[in-house]
Structure formats: structure tokens, C-alpha cells
Image (cartoon, grey):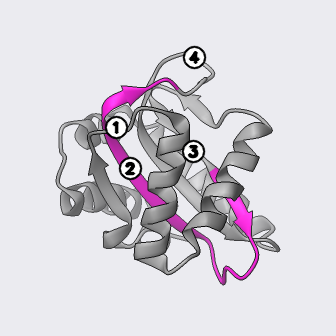
Amino acid sequence: MELGTLLLPNAVKSIAGCTSKKRLFHDLGELAETSHGLPGGAVIDALIEREGLGPTGVGQGVALPHARLANVEKVVGLFLRLEKPLSFDAVDRQPVDLVFALIAPENAGVDHLKALALVSRTLRDSNVCAKLRANSDAATLHAILTETQSSQAA
């Protein structure tokens, strides 16, 4: 599994005006709809429901919201770079500015976990995060995420 297969170029965005977790989930729902043709409302609801089980802010300014949805064929990724960090109830209490969401089929099983581990490994790399924070162009952000992963070869 590679990030390039999970994350399409049009599923990456840098946004300026995100002021709450709820707004962030709405932005992710819209991005899922435009980039993957998924029902935006269902994505929003699933992400909010999953977040209710416990925050997905993993620390170091990174959040990995994820959810399972019916009628999704494969695990897909969405990436948002927030120009203004957002309070996210992260484990280290630091605000979040890098958000990589995963939407998986209800029965994804191990594929969902493998994707989550891959994204987590990639965003634990402080050099990758520094490059992501230094760029706002969506194509550049996509290249940073997908090139880094393929050069590490899992």
C-alpha cells in the first residue's frame, strides 16, 4: 500500500478559514465529495461520530481523523493543511495544522489499519511535516506526501 494510491492529487488542499473541528469535518466532507464522489454529509457524520469516541489528534500538530462508511469501495485519503492551527484536543494539547483523513469501507478490516499506520509513519517524520508546513500549493503538498512515502519503501 502506498500513499499515492490512497491520496489523489485533487484530495489535497490548503485552507485558511477553518475555525472549529466541526468546520474542519465539513471541509473534509466537501473534499471527499469533490475528489472521490463520496456523499459529503455521510462523511461528515461518520467523522464526527468517530471523533466522539476519542480525539484523533496524535500530537506534533497532526490529526488523523478516520471513519468507515457503507458503499465505499476502497480506503481513500484526504489531506488538509490549515494555515491557522486549530484546537483539536490532541494528546499533547498542541493545536493541529496538518490533517490526513481516511475514509474506509465498513468491512475494510486490515486495509484500514495498514493505511492508518502508513499515514501515521509518514507524518511522524519531522522533516516531512516541516516541508508540508512550508508549502501551501496543493500539488506540492501531494508531491511531498507521495514522494516521501515511496522513497521510504515500506
Q: Which residue is drawn at 68% across and 33% down?
A: 55
**97 vs 16, nearest the viewer:** 16
The stretch drawn in magenta includes residue 82: yes
Q: How far separated are the C-alphas under marks 1 and 2?
A: 12 Å
Q: Which numbered tag is attached to residue 64?
A: 3
Name the side, left or right, on which 91 lies relative to 154: right
Q: How far separated are the C-alphas under marks 4 and 2?
A: 20 Å
- SS under mark 3: loop
Camera-nearest label, 1 or 2: 2
At which x and y percent is residue 53? Answer: 80, 38
Camera-nearest label, 1 or 4: 4
**12 vs 123, nearest the viewer:** 12
Q: How far separated are the C-alphas under marks 3 and 2?
A: 11 Å
- Residue wearing tag 2: 80
Residues marked 3 and 1 touching at CB (< 8 Å): no
In terms of sequence position, does the residue under pointer 4 or pointer 3 come before the other?
3
Q: How far separated are the C-alphas under marks 4 and 3?
A: 14 Å
Q: How far separated are the C-alphas under marks 1 and 4?
A: 16 Å
Query: Which amino acid type is marked by label 2?
Result: Leu
Q: Which numbered tag is attached to residue 92?
A: 4
In terms of sequence position, does the residue under pointer 4 or pointer 2 come before the other?
2
Name the side, left or right, on which 53 lies relative to 21: right
Q: Which numbered tag is attached to residue 129?
A: 1
Q: Residue at x 42, y 64 (%)?
A: 31
Residue stretch rendered in magenta on the structure = 66-87
- SS under mark 4: loop
Residue 129 can be seen in this image: yes
Residues marked 3 and 2 touching at CB (< 8 Å): no
Query: Which amino acid type is marked by label 1?
Result: Cys
